[in-house]
Each structure stands twice: as structure tokens, then as C-alpha cells.
Image: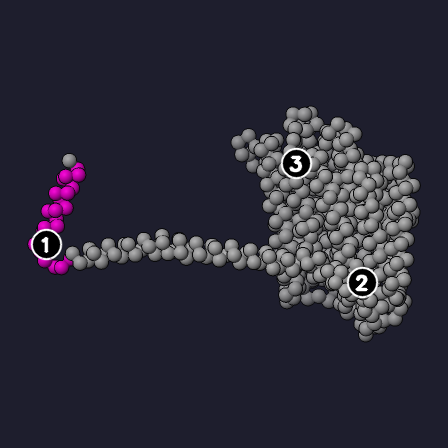
């Protein structure tokens, strides 16, 4: 049997689900949710078959022929694609199940589950794409799905504004990505990722400029929330919490990192250096910003931005090391360092961050949609299952030594930084300290002490449909760092983890990482009382952190001002130049000619004969 049938089935299940909901179940939320969850279960089963039972394969069908350029539609199922399929299918299924409870009373849940199905279709197509054009098509569909789900609450102005912000910010990055695709086509004469890689490995094509890599990286900056296009991701928390878990924690935002790993063979050392520093800057900036936030989902959102920065930095760091070791051959070098480290952290992060977002959703649902952590408190006793699961997810995020997945994936990144650039190493260690500090702050305020509001006081544990997904993700948050969890397809990733674990610098790296963890925990524990009602800090520096370094204000002011000036310039050009001089001017001249000709028509027969003869004479003169 052709293995591509399973790839087509992966796309067919969510597409059929979305179509069935859109055209036949819009008024039947219960049936729509059942169909969508059923499709997610079929996706998980089919993805499992592809990962564990099938060898790597590529399938390609000619779609459009433009002279010598063939635009093919097809699938590339390799180790990298299998790892992402594992993440998307597993987390996607658990989010669908969790949503059954979270969206139970929402009158528009049919539209919600239809949106989830469209997203799953888009994300699976992106992961399996075998060409840049196919990848870009599904990339844009993922963006559309995000826009639709962020703005799910149609009567909420902040949700509408957040969806528009996400759409615009991603379009800015996607414009660079599209230019990169055009650059690659001009350089290689093909859109096939396999053919491009073979051309680089054989030396047939040499990527001698950083331009191509940086243009492709623009897509990552937008989709994975890197500075300066990060502003959309925290605001995207306006959507339902399961959306935050699926799209803005585990899968969609990881698509930018996946793009880097998929196109890593096109990167030069200069491009990788820029990528590394953007990732480092994003990790530190987002960590500092998270310290001063009050909204539980916003804190987790900035944590996501920070961890994505770690992944991007890991890709740059590991790939630079591999370039040095392989004589600058990116195609053979990048898989051994940057890709493995970035994908290792991407995978573990998907599990524990999905757990944290779903855990926060369980808390918000129990507290009647309260999201301010200072209006919670005392939830440890009221929600014991959520408390235990959330604590395990938090432990993984802060890299609790030896017992969590996050410890191993974070350590792998720190080890790469220690080998390549000690300045980056110390900055990332500082970022690890920030992560521990703001997460322990959140944990103490939300779960310990006494309830700080009536909503928190009347909170209670949610049903099994919401807690079972938390428990499954909690297990993976603990064991996800061990090799036994991954199928044979993930061998390069596992080898990377083993190499880091037995590296000569591991003791030093573990010491610094452990110190950052311990200091962050102790400092947050001392500074924040259990169930605190208000933040105890203030001052100008803290105000800057609360205002997110004024990125949003700067965009609102300067971008709006620039947009206004451009609009005024266009208006002036249209009114004065186009409408005034050309259109009205031409009309005026025609009017004057008409008035002049009208004056000649005085009703005298001999005048008409005179002008007729004069005209005839002129005609003969010029004709002769």
C-alpha cells in the first residue's frame, strides 16, 4: 500500500470534520463537538501508525507547471516531520477532549470545534509539506485559523483587536518569508526542499549570502513571537483557553522553530549569529516582562515567548558549532546540533506548556472566568488534581533538576551555549532564573494561602473530561526528557540528549543551571507571601516591566502616526494630483472647449457654410 494514503487521511479527517460542522451542524454543538473530537482521535491513531510503523517517505504530485519551474504538492515524512506529528496529534487530541468540558455551556461551541478542525488540517499540512510553496500555503491557513479562534468571542472588542493584531503582525513576518521563497526559487530553480538540500550537499549551489536565511527567519519572527513581532502573542490570550494551549503554546508558535529546522541547510554563519542573538534577546525580554504581569494567561504567554527564544537561540548556537566542525557545510552540519536541541526543547515544552495552559483554563473555569492571580489564592485544597498537575508542569518549565523533562531539554541548550559563546550562556542562565522566579510567584499566589475573592472561595475541582488530559500531560512533563518516551524515528534527538548528558562541560552547566533554579525559587518564596492580594513592588523600573517595555505603546503611537501620514500623503496625491489636475483638469479643459464651440453655434446659415469650407480647405491642405 502506498504510505502516502495515510498522509492524505491525516488531512482528510479534520477537513471533513470542519466541512460537516460548517454545513450541517452549526446549530448542534453537541454533535459538532463529538465529530471534531472523533476526527482528532482518528488523527492521533493515523499519526501513530505513520510514526511507529512506516519508514520515511516522500510523495509528490505535479500541481502547476510554470515553464521550467514545477510547483508540486506533496508530503515529506522524515524524522523531523514525525516528531512534529507526534506533538500536534497528541496535544491536539487532549485539547479537543478538554474543550468538551471547558466549552460545554458555550452557545457557539459548534463554531469553536469547527475552528479547531480547520487548525488541525492546516498544522498537519504544514508539518508534512515537501516544498516551500506547499508549506507557505498551509502556513497562511494556520494564520487564518489563529485569527478566527483568537477572535472567537465576537461580542468582545478586546478579542477582535487581538485577532487583528495577530493577523497584521504575522503578515509582516510572512512578507519577508515570501520574499525568501522567491529568493530560493531564483537561486535553486525549484521549490522542493529535498532537491534544495541535495544541491547544497553536492556543492551544486552555494548559499553565499545571509539574505536568504534572514528572509526565511522573518517568518519565524512573526509566527514564533520573536522580538520585535512578539506583541501579538500575549494579546492572543483573549481567545478561549484551550486555543491558547493548542495554538499559542504547543503547536502554531512552534511552527516558526520548525521552519528554521526544516530550512537550516540554507543558513550561513552570519544568518545563524543574528538568529542566535534574536533568540537570546527574546528570552530575556519576555522573562523580565512576565515578572510584572497579573493575568495568569499573560504570564504563561510571556513564558512561551521566552521559551521560544530559547529554541531559536538553540538552533543558532548548535548550528554554528556544527558549521565549524563540518567545514561550513550547513546541509550536513545543522542536523547534529541546532535542530536536535531546538526540537528537543520544543517537544518537552509542548507537553508542559499545554499542561500549564489547560491547568490555567481549569482554574479560570472554576473561578468563574477570573484571570487576575491576585484575586485567586487558596486553590490547592479546593482543586487538588489541578494543583498537582499544574505543579508538575511548573516544575518542568523551571527545569527542576533530574526529575522533569524541562531540566534535560534546557540543559541541552545551556550546554550548547557554554561551548559556543559564554556570554550567551550566562544570559540564558539569567533567563532560567527569571523563569523560576515568575512561575514560583504565580504558584504561591494562586494556590497557597486563603482565597482573595468570592470566585476563588467558591471554586471547585472540574470533572474528569477536564482533569484526565491534565494528568496525561503531567506524566509526559515528567518523563518526556527520557529517551524511552520517543519512538525510533527520534533517534537523532535522543543521541543529542545523550551527548549533552555525557559532555565534558555537563557538570559546569548543571551547576549554573541548578544555582539559577535555586536562587529564583528562594527569592520568589521570600518576596511573595502565600495568597498575596497585591504586588509588593513598584517604581519606574517595575512600571516599565508592567508596560511590557512600551512596545505596544510605541507601535500604537508611531505606527499609527506613520500610517496617518502615509494616508494623508495618498489623500493629497489623490485629491490634488489625480482628481484635481488630471481628472478635474481634463474635465475643465473639455468644458472650456465645449463653451468655445457653443459660442460658434449662433444659428446663422452662412456662418455654418463658412466654417464648413474652412474645415474642408484645412483637410485638403494637410492631406495633400
Q: Is residue 101 left or right of residue 577?
A: right
Q: Residue at x 36, y 52 (%)?
A: 582
Q: Earlier in the sequence, mark 1 or mark 2?
A: 2
Which disc is residue 607 wearing? 1
Q: Earlier in the sequence, mark 3 or mark 1?
A: 3
Q: Is residue 358 left or right of residue 182?
A: right
- CB atoms of marks 1 and 2 within 8 Å: no
Helix, strand or loop for disc 3:
loop
Is residue 602 shown in magenta? yes
Residue on which disc 3 sits: 210
Residue on which disc 2 sits: 362
Q: Is residue 415 above or below residue 559?
A: above
Q: Nearer the viewer, residue 268 or 109?
A: 268
The location of residue 421, given as percent across then percent down, is 80, 39
Instruction: Name the quadrant of the N terminus.
Output: top right
Real-space CA distance between mark 3 and mark 2, rounded to the nearest whole angstrom? 45 Å
The location of residue 10, given as percent across then percent down, is 71, 45
Quarter of the image for residue 546 reads: bottom right
- CB atoms of marks 3 and 1 within 8 Å: no
Instruction: Name the quadrant of the C terminus.
Output: top left
Quarter of the image for residue 381 reads: bottom right
Q: Is residue 469 visible?
A: no
Q: Earlier in the sequence, mark 3 or mark 2?
A: 3
Q: Which residues are magenta?
A: 601-623
In front of the other: label 3 or label 1?
3
The location of residue 94, given as percent across then percent down, is 79, 54
Q: Nearer the viewer, residue 509 or 601?
A: 509
Amino acid at each position: 500500500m502506498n504510505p502516502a494514503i495515510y498522509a492524505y487521511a491525516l488531512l482528510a479527517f479534520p477537513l471533513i470534520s470542519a466541512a460537516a460542522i460548517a454545513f450541517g451542524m452549526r446549530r448542534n454543538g453537541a454533535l459538532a463537538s463529538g465529530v471534531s473530537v472523533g476526527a482528532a482521535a482518528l488523527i492521533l491513531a493515523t499519526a501513530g501508525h505513520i510514526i511507529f510503523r512506516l519508514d520515511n517517505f516522500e510523495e509528490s504530485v505535479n500541481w502547476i507547471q510554470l515553464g521550467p519551474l514545477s510547483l508540486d504538492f506533496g508530503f515529506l515524512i522524515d524524522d523531523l516531520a514525525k516528531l512534529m506529528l507526534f506533538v500536534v496529534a497528541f496535544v491536539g487530541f487532549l485539547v479537543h477532549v478538554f474543550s468538551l468540558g471547558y466549552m460545554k455551556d458555550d452557545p457557539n461551541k459548534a463554531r469553536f470545534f469547527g475552528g479547531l478542525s480547520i487548525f488541525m488540517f492546516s498544522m498537519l499540512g504544514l508539518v508534512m509539506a515537501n516544498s516551500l510553496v506547499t508549506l507557505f500555503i498551509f502556513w497562511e491557513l494556520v494564520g487564518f485559523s489563529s485569527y478566527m479562534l483568537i477572535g472567537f468571542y465576537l461580542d468582545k472588542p478586546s478579542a477582535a483587536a487581538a485577532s487583528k493584531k495577530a493577523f497584521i503582525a504575522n503578515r509582516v513576518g510572512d512578507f519577508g518569508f515570501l520574499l525568501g521563497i522567491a529568493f530560493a526559487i531564483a537561486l535553486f530553480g525549484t521549490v522542493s526542499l529535498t532537491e534544495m538540500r541535495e544541491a547544497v550537499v553536492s556543492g551544486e549551489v552555494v548559499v553565499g549570502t545571509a539574505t536568504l536565511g534572514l528572509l526565511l527567519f522573518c517568518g519565524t519572527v512573526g509566527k514564533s513571537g520573536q522580538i520585535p513581532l512578539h506583541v501579538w502573542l500575549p494579546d492572543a490570550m483573549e481567545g478561549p483557553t484551550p486555543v491558547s494551549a493548542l495554538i499559542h503554546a504547543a503547536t502554531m508558535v512552534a511552527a516558526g522553530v520548525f521552519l528554521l529546522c526544516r530550512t537550516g541547510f540554507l543558513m550561513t554563519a552570519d544568518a545563524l549569529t543574528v538568529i542566535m542573538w534574536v533568540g537570546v534577546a527574546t528570552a530575556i525580554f519576555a522573562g523580565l516582562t512576565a515578572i510584572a504581569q497579573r493575568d495568569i494567561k499573560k504570564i504563561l504567554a510571556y513564558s512561551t515567548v521566552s521559551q521560544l527564544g530559547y529554541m531559536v537561540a538553540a538552533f543558532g548556537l548548535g548550528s554554528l558549532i556544527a558549521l565549524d566542525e563540518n567545514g561550513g557545510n550547513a546541509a550536513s552540519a545543522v542536523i547534529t546540533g541546532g535542530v536536535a536541541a531546538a526540537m528537543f526543547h520544543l517537544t518537552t515544552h509542548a507537553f508542559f506548556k499545554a499542561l500549564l495552559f489547560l491547568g490555567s483554563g481549569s482554574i479560570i473555569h472554576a473561578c468563574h472566568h477570573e484571570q487576575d492571580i491576585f484575586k485567586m489564592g487558596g486553590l490547592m485544597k479546593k482543586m487538588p488534581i489541578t494543583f498537582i498537575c499544574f505543579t508538575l508542569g511548573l516544575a518542568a518549565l523551571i527545569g527542576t533538576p533530574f526529575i522533569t523533562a524541562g531540566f534535560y531539554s534546557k540543559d541541552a541548550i545551556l550546554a550548547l551555549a557554554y561551548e559556543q559563546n559564554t556570554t550567551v550562556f550566562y544570559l540564558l542562565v539569567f533567563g532560567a532564573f527569571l523563569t523560576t522566579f515568575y512561575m514560583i510567584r504565580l504558584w504561591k499566589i494562586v494556590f497557597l494561602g486563603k482565597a482573595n475573592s468570592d470566585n476563588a472561595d467558591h471554586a471547585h475541582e472540574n470533572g474528569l473530561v477536564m482533569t484526565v488530559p491534565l494528568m496525561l500531560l503531567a506524566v509526559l512533563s515528567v518523563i518526556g526528557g527520557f529517551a524511552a518516551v520517543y519512538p525510533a524515528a527520534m533517534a537523532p534527538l535522543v543521541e543529542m540528549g545523550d551527548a549533552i548528558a555525557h559532555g565534558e562541560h555537563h557538570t559546569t552547566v548543571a551547576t549554573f543551571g541548578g544555582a539559577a533554579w535555586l536562587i529564583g525559587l528562594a527569592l520568589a518564596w521570600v518576596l511573595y507571601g502565600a495568597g498575596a492580594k497585591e504586588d509588593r513592588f513598584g517604581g519606574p523600573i517595575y512600571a516599565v516591566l508592567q508596560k511590557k517595555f512600551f512596545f505596544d505603546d510605541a507601535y500604537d503611537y508611531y505606527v499609527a502616526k506613520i500610517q496617518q501620514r502615509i494616508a494623508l500623503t495618498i489623500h493629497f496625491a489623490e485629491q490634488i494630483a489625480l482628481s484635481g489636475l488630471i481628472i478635474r483638469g481634463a474635465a475643465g479643459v473639455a468644458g472650456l472647449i465645449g463653451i468655445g464651440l457653443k459660442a460658434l453655434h449662433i444659428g446663422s446659415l452662412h456662418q455654418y457654410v463658412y466654417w464648413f469650407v474652412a474645415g474642408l480647405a484645412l483637410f485638403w491642405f494637410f492631406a495633400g
